[in-house]
Image (cartoon, helix red, strand yellow):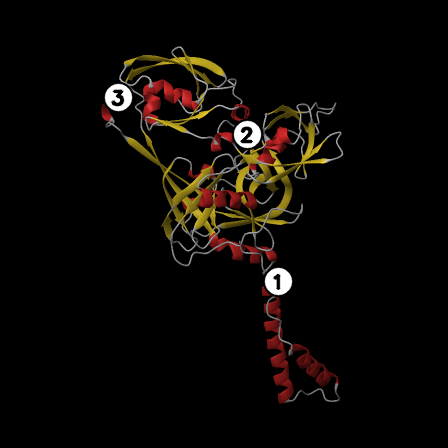
Amino acid sequence: MPQAQRFKRGPTPPRLLLPALAAITAGACGPSAVLSQADTSSVDQASELSQISSSQMIDESRRTAIVRAAARVAPAVVSVNVMRTRRVRPRTMWESMILPPGAQQRSTGFGSGVIVSEDGIVITNDHVITGASEIKITLPGGRDFNAEIVGTDPVADIAILRITGDDLPVAPVGTAKGLLIGEWAIAIGNPLGNYVADSEPTVTAGVISAVDRNIAPSSEDEGFYFGMIQTDASINPGNSGGALVNAQGDVIGVNASIISRSGGSEGLGFAIPIDRALQIADDFLEHGEIRRAWVGIDVEPAEADAWGRTRGVRISRVTEGSPADEAALQRGDMLLRANGRPLSGPLDWEGVLLDLRAGNGLELSVQGQSRTIEMEAMQFPSSIAARVTLFQDIELITVSSQIQGELGLSSESGALIADISTELTSRTRLQMGDVIIQMNRTRIRSAEDAASFFDELTGQQGRIVVYLERDNSYYTTSLSWRG
């Protein structure tokens, strides 16, 4: 990604001023009080140069670091316009009579985004484009582009879009690592959306108030945010997805959330570190999915002191055969730091996992142990397990001890439904995440067992009673079979 470049200083004021002023001074202090025509010309020239120099100095003083940073990034901060379509359900008998079948209602929304590459990759928030049937990107100059979704990550609240066009502006990106508390922070976005005639973004300024903030949801519609940058630069609705910029003019974060009693900015704004957003973009562009890592432990809060403060997290479970198991971690161990980040509670641990990828190293500091425990994270067992396909509509994987630990299953064996078509779900009431543990009187211990069961029913018909685990509870359902 482009690295930050230092701005050159503005043009130096003319250096003719001092000689001209010297000439005036010499004439005034001489024996004659009458100025010659040449002297008068020198005075006029000096006055004119003085005015030019003063104007240039004032103009240069206006071009602060904030002005220069905004000018560097603002051309690549775009407006994200969203069209949503939903089916209208009649609320009264009268509405059911007048509404046509399949009536739909359209609604619009807007947010911000930032172009981070020449091939038109735009980063915004997942909540900005959720449920969109159409997305239009508007550049500050007024150009419109239809956007396609490359991928969305609701966990991190990041969405990756792509637009196609010539001469697209690109924002220089930096890093959120090493941010200084109190350094300048500039928020650039489109809080007014289409309520104003022009498409130029809005700029607000403040400082970095804190880093590594964990934000708990304030309503049912919002999720957790981990490891966020806090700023008092004004962030308002519509700013979501816009850029948080440092004084050098580098993007350091993606504006995402505020804490507010009024609904407007109260100096408590939060941005997702740009490093995380770029990593998610790389995942989608290279692999087509997010490839987060698994270490095989669950944690719980430590006991609080008399003031309600906690330090560290306690391991509540270690999965057999996991990286944590191989590193000799045990249930009850107290983790104090992870990759150098202090752990005050489970949210800090989740923040570490959010940015961890398969193959990354993880260093853990354990209370009472002088050594630093090192391990290498791996892909989630369920994502790399072999899959068995049935009827082209359902994919099964065998429950192993690792998958049991990963998903927190009660069953030690069975056939986990890893994927199933919407049509088959509606017909059978089976759903993704169910674990089939028995069909009729046949115990199902693996995906292969389930496949063999249906193979033996070829040419037969009847009903099949399926016993399954769902959300740590056990259910039965029946299927009509005709082989």
Amino acid residing under circle 3:
Trp
Rounded to the nearest whole Å, what is the CA distance between mark 1 and mark 3? 67 Å
Mark closer to the chain start, 1 or 2 = 1
| Residue 396 spot, x, y in % from top left | 41, 26
Badge 2 local density, few (<14 within 10 Å), some, or many (20+)?
A: few
List the residue tagged with mark 2.
Answer: 217
Q: Are the residues tagged 1 and 3 within 8 Å (C-beta)?
A: no
Q: Secondary structure at mark 2?
A: loop
Badge 3 local density, few (<14 within 10 Å), some, or many (20+)?
A: few
Rounded to the nearest whole Å, what is the CA distance between mark 3 and mark 2? 39 Å
State the residue in front, 40 or 92.
92
Q: Secondary structure at mark 3?
A: helix
Up the image or down, 148 lies above or below 454; here it is: below
Amino acid residing under circle 1:
Ser
List the residue tagged with mark 3.
Answer: 94
In the image, which is nearer the foreground, mark 1 or mark 2? Answer: 2
State the image quarter where residue 42 is shown: bottom right
Amino acid residing under circle 2:
Pro
Q: Secondary structure at mark 1?
A: helix
Q: Are the residues tagged 3 and 2 within 8 Å (C-beta)?
A: no
Up the image or down, 56 lies above or below 190; here it is: below
Badge 1 local density, few (<14 within 10 Å), some, or many (20+)?
A: few
| Residue 243 spot, x, y in % from top left | 52, 47
Left or right of residue 54: residue 30:
right
Which circle marks residue 61 in the picture? Answer: 1
State the image quarter where residue 343 is shown: top right
State the residue in front, 461 or 72.
461
Left or right of residue 280: residue 392:
left
